Image (cartoon, coloured by chain):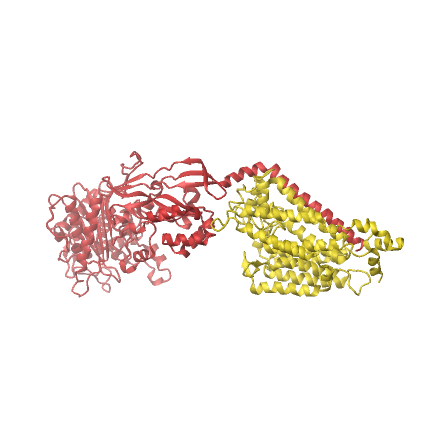
């Protein structure tokens, strides 16, 4: 495609060829409708995650069942996979029409957490459904991406998609109403991810770069005011910025980071071997089956294992943006891009925090961390990306051109 | 999709690559370049250091009788990090060990923050519990059986105030001494008495075992092992047989006094507390130190119960934990040793000065009459008669003359009181010694700073102090100390309870046999005069009735009685003494709270003790004698 946009290319093709039959060969080549690279990476990583979770937790509940977390994660994975398949069957473009309904479902879900939720580590983010607990803020991310993609994409009244002031303001309302509810929980870690995902979508929406600068600038000012006004406490800030002080003593706020680096570093090139990690299993690294799962990987499989995991995650993100570029419409493009941003921001912050490059904020590592909500949500996201990919060329080029012309 | 969108997505693609590269570089740095360093540090993470308790040193009396020993036993220790996460373990422990669930949890939560990985939660467990814990060790991670030592008191309550008791080290001490002395949570330390004073000698040095653990925290192999060094044994100057006799005599006498009425009233004496100090007059060694009421230190073994602790601190039980021998009280006439020596030294009286006692004394002016305890007066007395009869008027006059000399600019009475060791700690090797109080101008000004009218030192204050009244406070030990100094003609030996320190194999660690003294260079003539007065006290004076059957010709006893008025209390009875006069061997001081006259009630105790010390067949039951005297 090079430097031409999709619409222009389609138009040119329509004008030049004049009739549809000339496209047969090309259509045939594109008949492989499923992004197998993305799919394989996802399946491999999540299956690997189940194995690592077993390694990390088999001593956690020795009196109950060493396979407790392993079995639960396996069930989560099976359910996620089933839903993944289910989500491929309908056309993602239908979502664009009902985005406002999705938005209100999302808001209702987050509000219900405030009323019916219970706290884990002082974050009121969970709802107990008796057979399992769900964390609406994980699904909420996907819902927000759908809503934002719909807001930024071509509206019916528009002849040609254009992201102007009205769309930006609407997107700000959609994103920040969601982020506000997350902050009330309060889950600052997730709020940061939401914000990064929003600015990412805003960036690729085609909006004027000044809007992007404006939104990030005003948010930065807000955070600064929050610190000044005491809404954000000094100890919270200290905890956030502890990674900037590499020689912090291995107790207090620096404890988690110190132990995590010790675990990963001691893994050396090839690791201590699967199931043979001592630091993580001896409870030195906290939350080692959820937020610090990467420490287990680093310790037990060494640089080699961590390298492979990073490459696979990178590949997944790359495929998301690849799909974004090749989507049939800009709704699909922004949808796939948004999912890509979710994975990118979470993997960067999560892995970054375990090795001292990022502040320690409690967010899971996609595909690998233990937890049903986070796994199911990310599978739903990947299903949407695959959905966009599968429907990238369902219409003939002239149809695209015609639609644009209309 | 427009051009800018496409470009921006491509830009994001590069960003993804950049992020992955940065993360990989950082991982490369961590794992490949510094991997060895981290691996080294991590091995410290998988080793555990366990200390092994050292037996606390034994405590013997001067004749080698074993008073307190360390007995090995087993206790339960837990790792708060592991156990706090497991409610099932907490509840098992609380039910099996009979501890309150919430107390246990609170205790562990407190220690958790200090990064201690082992806390002893129970000192002494029975066999059944031990077997249970051992059999279920697999389902009780973080719970350990530890070998520890507990105190065993072979003589029960005897000398408990001198010996003191041990208890669990508290949070504050743990923090402050953790690194320097190697204490851990749950350790026993001396909290009072000799146990506290010689903590450093008794505690020994813990052993250490360093071992590696598997991922479940189970020990795999021992890396390093150091044996413990037992604490040193302490030999006290106390003679436990004498101590037993003294304590029993004190208790019996107080019980007898409680049956008596105060004067002609219908009220019984309270006689709720008392103390006796017996010193070796030649060395300052404490042969016996009794304080009544007493307590059984074994209630502290394995942690004292709340009920027991409340009982020991109940005012109705007169605070049995207090060592009254080193607490201070108003002394009364036993303090007359000070004006006697001061008066002679300063020349305000001499050997033959006669002062007339008509029962009432107007030395402070006719508006301020003062009375002798003997309302009819003693007539004309020299210093010997003054001491023998404990004549208040005689010492009013002496004190007033001391006050008037140089307009009290030197505070002569206070000066001599301090010279003889009052108003300061004697320096005995026991914690919490009370220095007592010698009131003077400066003290009064400070004490009554909000009551200006009262803040001036009046001549009456000196006069009152001359008979041991006013704000003056003296401890039984200080009294014994002063009389011992007089007996030794001015040589001051510091009272002490530690005789020897021996290590496990019996070798002397510290030689303490050489008693150092400080020579006050007292005037020998004046000392002789005062001693003659004290001699008369037991022969025909205020203490005579108690010594009526005592062979004073063979063993002359120098003594002085005291009956202190204490506002809001019944009179305090005192007796200070030493014997034999020519070659002093023993000093005996007695103090009885709210027990009436010193001659009637305190002196008999001293007499009984001298009978015991000189193996004299007892001629009289220990009971209060009936004559009334100061």
- Residue B91 pos. (x, y %): 41, 54
- Say which of A71 and B153 sits in front: A71
- Residue B576 pos. (x, y %): 20, 50
In screen coordinates, is A333 left or right of B277?
Answer: right
In screen coordinates, is A61 left or right of B563?
Answer: right
Q: Which quadrant of the rendered structure holds the C terminus of chain A?
A: bottom right
In screen coordinates, is A128 left or right of B504?
Answer: right
- Residue A21 pos. (x, y %): 86, 53
Numbered-mark total? 0
Quadrant hosting residue B364:
bottom left
- Indicate the chain coloured yellow by its letter: A
- Residue B230 pos. (x, y %): 34, 38
- Say which of A181 and A157 sits in front: A157
Quadrant hosting residue B496:
top left
- Say which of B501 and A19 sits in front: A19
| Residue B387 visible in rendering | no
Q: Which residue is at 39% across, 54% downward? A: B94
| Residue A393 visible in rendering | yes
- Indicate the chain coloured red by its letter: B
Quadrant hosting residue A148:
bottom right
Above-or-below relation of B236 to A334:
above
Q: Which residue is at 69% across, 52% downward? A: A340
């Amino acid at each position: 495609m090079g430097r031409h946009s999709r619409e222009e290319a389609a138009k040119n093709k329509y004008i030049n060829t004049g009739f549809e039959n000339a496209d047969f060969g090309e259509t045939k080549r594109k008949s492989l409708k499923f992004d197998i690279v993305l799919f394989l990476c996802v399946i491999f990583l999540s299956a690997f995650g189940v194995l690592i979770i077993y390694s990390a937790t088999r001593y956690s509940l020795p009196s109950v069942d060493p396979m407790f977390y392993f079995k639960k994660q396996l069930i989560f994975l099976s359910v996620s996979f089933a839903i993944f398949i289910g989500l491929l069957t309908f056309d993602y473009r239908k979502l664009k029409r009902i985005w406002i309904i999705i938005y209100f479902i999302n808001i209702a879900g987050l509000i219900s957490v405030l009323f019916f939720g219970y706290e884990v580590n002082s974050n009121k983010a969970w709802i107990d459904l008796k057979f399992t607990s769900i964390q609406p803020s994980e699904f909420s991310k996907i819902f927000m991406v759908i809503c934002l993609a719909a807001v930024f994409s071509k509206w019916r009244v528009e002849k040609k998609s254009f992201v102007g002031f009205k769309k930006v303001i609407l997107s700000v309302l959609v994103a920040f109403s969601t982020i506000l509810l997350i902050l009330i929980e309060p889950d600052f870690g997730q709020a940061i991810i939401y914000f990064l995902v929003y600015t990412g979508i805003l960036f690729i929406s085609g909006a004027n770069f000044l809007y992007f600068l404006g939104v990030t600038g005003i948010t930065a000012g807000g955070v600064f005011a929050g610190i000044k006004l005491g809404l954000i406490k000094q100890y919270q800030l200290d905890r956030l910025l502890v990674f900037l002080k590499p020689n912090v003593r291995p107790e207090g706020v620096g404890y988690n980071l110190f132990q995590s680096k010790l675990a990963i570093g001691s893994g050396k090139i090839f690791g201590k071997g699967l199931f043979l990690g001592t630091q993580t299993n001896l409870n030195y690294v906290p939350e080692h089956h959820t937020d610090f799962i990467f420490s287990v990987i680093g310790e037990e499989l060494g640089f080699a294992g961590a390298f492979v995991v990073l490459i696979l995650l990178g590949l997944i993100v790359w495929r998301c943006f690849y799909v974004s570029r090749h989507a049939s419409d800009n709704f699909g493009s922004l949808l796939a891009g948004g999912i890509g941003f979710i994975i990118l921001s979470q993997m960067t912050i999560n892995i970054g925090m375990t090795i001292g490059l990022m502040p320690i904020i409690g967010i899971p590592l996609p595909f690998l961390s233990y937890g049903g909500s986070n796994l199911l949500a990310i599978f739903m996201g990947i299903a949407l990306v695959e959905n966009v990919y599968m429907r990238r060329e369902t219409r003939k080029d002239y149809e695209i051109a015609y639609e644009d012309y209309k | 999709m427009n051009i800018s969108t496409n470009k921006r997505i491509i830009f994001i693609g590069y960003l993804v690559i950049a992020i992955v590269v940065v993360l990989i570089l950082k991982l490369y740095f961590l794992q490949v370049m510094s991997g060895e360093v981290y691996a080294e540090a991590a091995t410290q993470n998988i080793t555990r250091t366990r200390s092994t308790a050292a037996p606390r040193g034994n405590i013997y009396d001067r004749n080698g009788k074993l008073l307190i020993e360390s007995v090995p036993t087993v206790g339960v220790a837990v790792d708060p990090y592991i156990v706090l996460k497991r409610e099932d373990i907490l509840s098992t422990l609380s039910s099996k060990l009979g501890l309150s669930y919430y107390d246990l949890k609170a205790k562990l939560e407190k220690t958790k923050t200090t990064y201690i990985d082992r806390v002893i939660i129970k000192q002494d467990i029975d066999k059944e519990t031990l077997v249970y814990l051992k059999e279920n060790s697999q389902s009780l991670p973080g719970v350990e059986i530890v070998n520890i030592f507990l105190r065993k008191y072979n003589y029960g309550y005897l000398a408990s105030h001198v010996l003191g008791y041990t208890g669990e080290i508290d949070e504050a001490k743990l923090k402050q001494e953790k690194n320097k002395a190697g204490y851990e949570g749950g350790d026993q330390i001396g909290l009072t008495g000799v146990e506290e004073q010689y903590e450093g000698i008794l505690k020994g040095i813990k052993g250490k075992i360093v071992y590696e653990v598997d991922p479940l925290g189970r020990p795999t192999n021992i890396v390093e092992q150091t044996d413990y060094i037992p604490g040193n044994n302490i030999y006290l100057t106390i003679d436990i047989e004498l101590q037993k006799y003294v304590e029993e005599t004190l208790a019996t006498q107080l019980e007898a006094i409680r049956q008596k009425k105060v004067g002609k009233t219908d009220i019984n004496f309270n006689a709720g507390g008392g103390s006796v100090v017996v010193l070796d007059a030649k060395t300052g060694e404490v042969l016996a130190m009794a304080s009544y009421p007493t307590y059984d230190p074994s209630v502290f073994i394995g942690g004292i119960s709340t009920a027991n602790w409340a009982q020991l601190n109940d005012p109705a039980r007169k605070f049995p934990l207090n060592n009254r021998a080193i607490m201070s009280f108003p002394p009364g006439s036993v303090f007359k040793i000070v004006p006697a020596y001061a008066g002679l030294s300063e020349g305000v009286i001499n050997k033959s000065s006669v002062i007339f006692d008509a029962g009432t004394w107007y030395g402070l002016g006719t508006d301020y009459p003062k009375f002798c305890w003997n309302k009819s007066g003693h007539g004309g007395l020299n210093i010997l008669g003054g001491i023998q009869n404990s004549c208040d008027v005689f010492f009013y006059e002496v004190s007033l003359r001391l006050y008037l000399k140089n307009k009290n600019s030197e505070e002569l009475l206070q000066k001599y009181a301090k010279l003889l060791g009052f108003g300061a700690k004697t320096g005995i090797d026991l914690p919490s010694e009370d220095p007592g109080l010698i009131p003077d101008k400066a003290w009064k000004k400070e004490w009554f700073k909000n009551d200006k009218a009262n803040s001036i030192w009046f001549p009456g204050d000196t006069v009152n102090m001359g008979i041991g009244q006013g704000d003056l406070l003296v401890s039984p030990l200080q009294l014994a100390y002063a009389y011992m100094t007089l007996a030794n003609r001015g040589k001051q030996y510091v009272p002490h309870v530690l005789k020897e320190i021996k290590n496990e194999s019996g070798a002397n660690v510290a030689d303490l046999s050489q008693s150092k003294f400080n020579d006050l260079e007292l005037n020998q003539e004046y000392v002789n005069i005062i001693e003659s007065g004290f001699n008369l006290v037991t022969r025909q004076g205020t203490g005579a009735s108690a010594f009526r059957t005592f062979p004073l010709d063979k063993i002359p006893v120098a003594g002085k009685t005291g009956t202190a008025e204490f506002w809001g209390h019944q009179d305090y009875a005192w007796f200070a003494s030493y014997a034999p006069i020519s070659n002093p061997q023993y000093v005996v001081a007695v103090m009885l709270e709210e027990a009436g006259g010193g001659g009637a009630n305190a002196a008999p105790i001293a007499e009984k003790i001298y009978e015991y010390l000189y193996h004299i067949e007892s001629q009289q039951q220990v009971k209060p004698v009936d004559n009334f005297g100061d």
